[in-house]
Amino acid sequence: MARYRIEAKSRIPGQGAIMIRIAAIPLAAGFVLVGATSLTGQGTVGLRFGATDGTVSAGRLDGLDQVPRRSFSLEGSVTLSLREHFDLRLGLALTGKGTTYGLGSLLANEDLRGTLTYERTYVELRALGRAVLPLWNRRVSLYALGGPALAFSGKCDVSWHATTGPSTSRSTYFDRCELPLGPDSHIRLNGGGDFGAIGGLGAGFSFWDMGLSTEVLYTLGLRSDGTAGDTVRNRVRTVQFGVSVPFR
């Protein structure tokens, strides 16, 4: 029965060659996938921690002096190798954003000076491509990375710290998520997600089955947190250190 089927298919001139070519297509694709698997089979799991400096681009407040808000960043990630010198890092981070403004009185009928502090802590999803330049027998590497980030915040703290005397001060905490501009003026902020782009440079060192790294990142907010036409976007600089181990 098997012999009859082979002979029947070969009666039409050229059909056998066509079938061989068709059969070769998934076979070639299989070889490609096997090759890709050999490149992507090695991945790493990493943990990074560091410090952040956050500022804000906020329309009507851009003319005021800002002092970056110092906060923290903690990230867990999985890195998958796509090509020999290129990989994809998927991360979940807890990071602080915000800023501190120095400005005059925000309260009616009072001649006070102080600072306005805007604080938020985000849970951020990151998908960063990384191009690697290996050095010194591949144990030392320099790399550049970049990609999108989507962050979510459920907490927003805005406070006004007024100087009332040479050694005294008074703090006012606002119930709403807004940046006050004066007694009767404010910029209302959204409580939802923050979409941005991350770019940076890093260096890594590997020994045994462990890798150590240090990175400098910059996050540029692309989505505005402001409502009613006010533009409020986060700007964050991060310096972080990390450790990673491989998995297969």
Image (cartoon, rainbow, N blue to C red):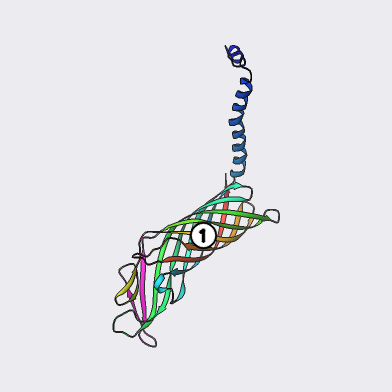
- Image quadrant containing the C terminus: top right
Residue bearing the label numbered 1 = 198
Q: Residue at x 61, y 44 (%)?
A: 39
Left or right: where 42 falls relative to 110? right
Residue 230 percent coordinates (x, y): 37, 67
Q: Range of the magenta residues?
A: 153-174
Residue 142's place in the image compared with 170, above or below, is above
Residue 80 percent coordinates (x, y): 56, 48
Left or right: where 128 falls relative to 123? right
Residue 42's place in the image compared with 207, above or below, is above
Residue 181 percent coordinates (x, y): 35, 75
- Image quadrant containing the N terminus: top right
Q: Amino acid at mark 1?
A: Ile
Residue closer to the observer: 200 or 71? 200
- The extreme bottom residue here reads 166
Residue closer to the observer: 17 or 35? 17
Q: Residue at x 62, y 33 (%)?
A: 28
Left or right: where 19 falls relative to 69? right
Residue 56's place in the image compared with 145, above or below, is below
Magenta-span inclusion, residue 70: no
Q: Residue at x 45, y 75 (%)?
A: 66
Residue closer to the observer: 146 or 229? 229
Density class for disc 1 (Cα within 10 Å; few <14, some 14-19, many ≥20) is some
The image quarter containing residue 228 is: bottom left
Q: How many marks?
A: 1
- The extreme front residue here reads 13
Residue 8 percent coordinates (x, y): 59, 13
Task: For mark 1, give the secondary structure.
Answer: strand
